């Protein structure tokens, strides 16, 4: 079950987490009289982790409460994200939370979402 800071915010529907590659920063310098260039490795930088899925609840107000709880995690603090396979992504910053569809009603109230995290090394 996917959780954010051990809270089951995403248990109401399926979701998928896609981590991007770690970025690496370098500085290139050339000097007069030197064939080629020097490359300084400045180390590993952050990466993007994208989560997409569906939230559902028995009522519109319960779904809105769930959405509000997720939006409250966009607080500038680092969090811990755990996916369905117990893979933990530590030091993640919730950068954006977007509803991909309006609130809809079927057997329950639901909406699709997309979350973009920035994971720090």
Image (cartoon, helix red, strand yellow):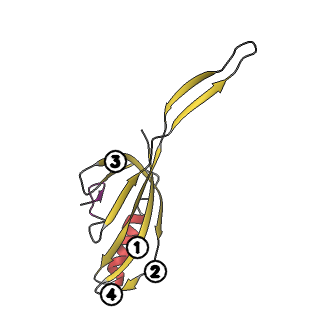
* Residue that lies at the very extreme toward the front in this rendered image: 35
Question: Could you tell me residue 93's position as x and y percent?
Answer: 44, 51
Q: Which residue is mark 2?
A: 102
In-front residue for pair 118/28? 28
Q: Which residue is mark 3?
A: 89
In terms of secondary structure, where does tag 4 sit? loop
Decide: few, some or many residues near mark 3? Use Cα within 10 Å; few <14, some 14-19, many ≥20. some
What whole-number distance in Å separates the C-alpha atoms at marks 1 and 2? Answer: 8 Å
In-front residue for pair 14/2? 14
Q: Is residue 5 magenta?
A: yes
Q: Which residues are magenta?
A: 2-8
Q: Is residue 21 above or below residue 15?
A: above
Decide: few, some or many residues near mark 2? Use Cα within 10 Å; few <14, some 14-19, many ≥20. few
Q: Residue at x 76, y 15 (%)?
A: 32
Q: Is residue 46 left or right of residue 51?
A: right
Is the N terminus in the top left, top right, bottom left or bottom right quadrant? bottom left
Q: Main secondary structure of the magenta part?
A: loop
Marks 2 & 3, CB-CB < 8 Å contact: no
Q: Which residue is mark 4?
A: 106
Q: How many marks?
A: 4
What whole-number distance in Å separates the C-alpha atoms at marks 1 and 3? Answer: 22 Å
Please tell me in which quadrant of the rendered image residue 34 appears. Answer: top right
Lower position in the chain sequence, tag 2 or tag 3: 3
Q: Which residue is mark 1?
A: 112
Lower position in the chain sequence, tag 1 or tag 2: 2
Please tell me in which quadrant of the rendered image residue 21 appears. Answer: top left
Q: Is residue 53 magenta?
A: no
* Residue that lies at the very extreme toward the top in this rendered image: 33
């Amino acid at each position: 079950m996917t959780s954010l800071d051990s809270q089951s915010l995403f248990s109401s529907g399926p979701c998928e987490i896609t981590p991007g590659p770690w970025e690496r920063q370098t500085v290139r310098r050339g000097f007069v009289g030197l064939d080629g260039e020097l490359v300084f490795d400045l180390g590993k930088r952050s990466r993007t982790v994208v989560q997409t899925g569906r939230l559902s609840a028995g009522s519109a107000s319960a779904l809105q409460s769930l959405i509000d709880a997720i939006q409250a995690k966009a607080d500038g603090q680092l969090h811990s994200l755990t996916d369905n396979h117990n893979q933990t992504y530590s030091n993640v910053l919730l950068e954006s939370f977007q509803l991909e569809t309006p609130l809809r009603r079927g057997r329950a109230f639901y909406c699709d979402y997309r979350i973009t995290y920035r994971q720090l090394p």
